[in-house]
């Protein structure tokens, strides 16, 4: 009887822990880094060089945090601190690539600035709550999508590979380092429901929760963007696009024509949902799992 009780306890513990234990594969890292970078390019008006560098930075970030998220889901303090260390390195590298205007706009969008949150013993990317159609892309795959393997990461360039590569007006300020920000405790609470001071209640800070906008065309954060000649031309792309940004006509915002990976077109808009990591790949590709 005692052995049966122990077996049942271990089985229940294993079932409870499975959603947070499996790390992303390299193909999942590439796919999710591309999706996040594609939306950043769309909303922040990135040019083709920035698009490639942003993809590398997001790849390095997801590759680094994939092994600590198991502890983050469980509220482990060292894992959470390590996560925000990776996030600070990522956001600092982005400050070397984005212009000052682009970075301030980036920091004002929670699903870009702090891209991961936990929910019901699982961790998710917030961007999938805003853009739920995981098969639709505004741009073709980055030129370095298949070849980049972390060679420009902070493990090889401690001062940052991207420092000094851009000569436009850059942002240098406290937003690059979340751990030193005055709202750090609030960020920890709203991202992972933990606080560095147990006797402190979160402030009245209200984050932009995933799923607030169902369709990118209705997102007020992407309106009134300047028309720059050097930014990426926007065309329709499936996950099997060419190896560089499209040079086609910018899609109409009144009606986006979506292309599935199999080439079947559809224009019925995106459906609300989120992608939950550590489930099977088929569920990730299909679109949205309900929260």
Image (cartoon, grey):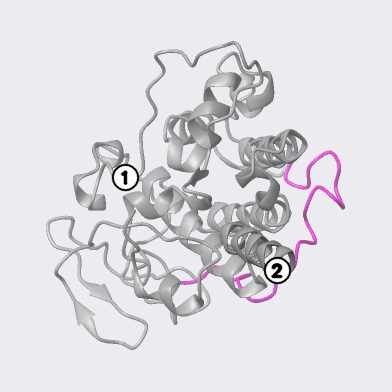
In the image, what residue occupies the spot 73% across and 41% down?
Answer: 79
Q: Secondary structure at mark 2?
A: loop
Q: Residue at x 24, y 37 (%)?
A: 220
Q: Which residues are magenta?
A: 140-163
- Other residues around mark 1 within 10 Å, as few (<14) / some (14–19) / many (≥20): few
Q: Residue at x 36, y 37 (%)?
A: 209
Q: Is residue 106 shown left or right of residue 29?
A: left
Give the camera-side residue of 116 and 267. 116
Q: In the displayed structure, would residue 186 be above or below residue 130?
A: above
The reply to whether the C-beta atoms of the residues labelled 2 and 1 are less than 8 Å apart is no
Label at residue 227: 1
Position in image of residue 266 (x %, y %) = 18, 77
Task: Judge left or right: residue 78 versus residue 95.
Answer: right
- Residue at label 2? 148
Q: Residues within 10 Å of mark 2 (few under 14, many from 20)?
A: some
Image coords of residue 15 (percent x, y) = 58, 64
Q: Residue sitting at 71 percent across and 62 percent down? A: 6
């Amino acid at each position: 009887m005692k052995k049966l009780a122990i077996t049942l306890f271990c089985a229940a513990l294993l079932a409870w822990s499975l959603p947070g234990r499996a790390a992303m594969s390299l193909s999942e890292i590439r796919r999710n880094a591309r999706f996040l970078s594609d939306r950043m390019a769309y909303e922040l008006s990135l040019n083709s060089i920035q698009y490639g560098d942003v993809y590398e930075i997001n790849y390095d970030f997801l590759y680094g945090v994939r092994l600590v998220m198991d502890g983050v889901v469980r509220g482990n303090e060292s894992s959470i601190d390590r996560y925000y260390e990776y996030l600070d390195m990522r956001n600092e590298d982005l400050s070397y690539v984005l212009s000052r205007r682009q970075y301030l706009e980036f920091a004002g969008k929670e699903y870009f600035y702090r891209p991961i949150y936990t929910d019901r013993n699982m961790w998710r990317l917030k961007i999938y709550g805003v853009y739920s159609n995981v098969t639709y892309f505004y741009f073709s795959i980055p030129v370095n999508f298949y070849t980049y393997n972390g060679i420009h990461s902070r493990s090889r360039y401690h001062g940052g590979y991207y420092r000094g590569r851009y000569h436009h007006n850059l942002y240098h300020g406290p937003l690059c380092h979340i751990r030193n920000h005055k709202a750090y405790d609030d960020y920890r609470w709203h991202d992972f429901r933990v606080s560095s001071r147990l006797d402190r209640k979160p402030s009245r800070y209200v984050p932009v929760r995933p799923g607030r906008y169902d369709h990118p065309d209705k997102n007020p954060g992407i309106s009134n963007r300047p028309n720059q000649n050097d930014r990426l031309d926007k065309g329709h792309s499936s996950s099997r696009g060419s190896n560089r940004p499209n040079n086609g006509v910018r899609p109409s915002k009144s009606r986006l024509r979506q292309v599935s990976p199999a080439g079947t077109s559809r224009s019925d808009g995106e459906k609300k949902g989120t992608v939950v990591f550590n489930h099977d790949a088929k569920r990730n590709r299909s679109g949205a799992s309900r929260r």
